[in-house]
Amino acid sequence: MTARARARIVHVGFYVKDLDASVAWYEEVLGMEKQFGFPGRARALGWGGEKEDHDIFLVQAPDAYEEPSPMHFDYETLTPVKGRIGFYHVSIDFGSFEAAIPAFSLDSPHARRVMH
């Protein structure tokens, strides 16, 4: 068996109903700090550390978005579906592009369906 790349989660993104209220919660309850943002649209927050990077990325959801559902993309037809409040994306660092290739190869049984 070949060695698997050591991957790590870099950050997680969420669609939120109220960006300002959500940012306040992450700051007050979890002690996160604002890293960067796009006024009224999105905000990155983190706990700091050695580099100025973010751990959470919050995006103001459009008014038409509905309450929680884990799916924003139909992995069978590879087409977008109506957005939902909640999970948006996860960023994973594989260390190099080459190390990430096996995880996303079309030969992989996980290439089209990564629903957790």
Image (spheres, rainbow, N blue to C red):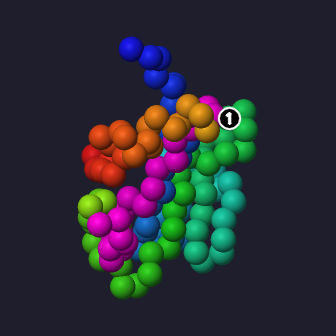
Instruction: Give the image location of residue 115, x and y in percent.
Output: 28, 50
Instruction: Give the image location of residue 103, x and y in percent.
Output: 44, 37
Instruction: Give the image location of residue 81, x and y in percent.
Output: 32, 74
Looking at this view, name the residue that lies furthest to the bottom. Answer: 64
> Amino acid type of disc 1?
Gly
> Residue at point 29% right, 66% down?
77
Using residue 94 as the reference point, say whether residue 70 is left or right of it.
left
Mark 1, secondary structure of its residue: loop
- Residue 112 magenta: no
Could you tell me which quadrant the N terminus lies in?
top left
The mark tally for this picture is 1
Using residue 15 as the reference point, say whether residue 112 is left or right of it.
left
> Residue at point 35% right, 65% down?
78
Which is more toward the observer, 80 or 10?
Answer: 80
Query: What residue sits right under mark 1 in the picture?
Result: 49
Looking at this view, name the residue that lies furthest to the top. Answer: 1
In the image, is residue 30 above or below residue 22?
above
Which is more toward the observer, 109 or 7?
Answer: 109
> Residue at point 41% right, 74% down?
17
Asked if residue 53 can be seen in this view, the reply is yes
Instruction: Give the image location of residue 59, x and y in percent.
Output: 51, 68
Q: Which residues are magenta?
A: 77-96
- Residue 86 magenta: yes
Q: Quadrant of residue 95?
A: top right
Using residue 53 as the reference point, say whether residue 24 is left or right of it.
left
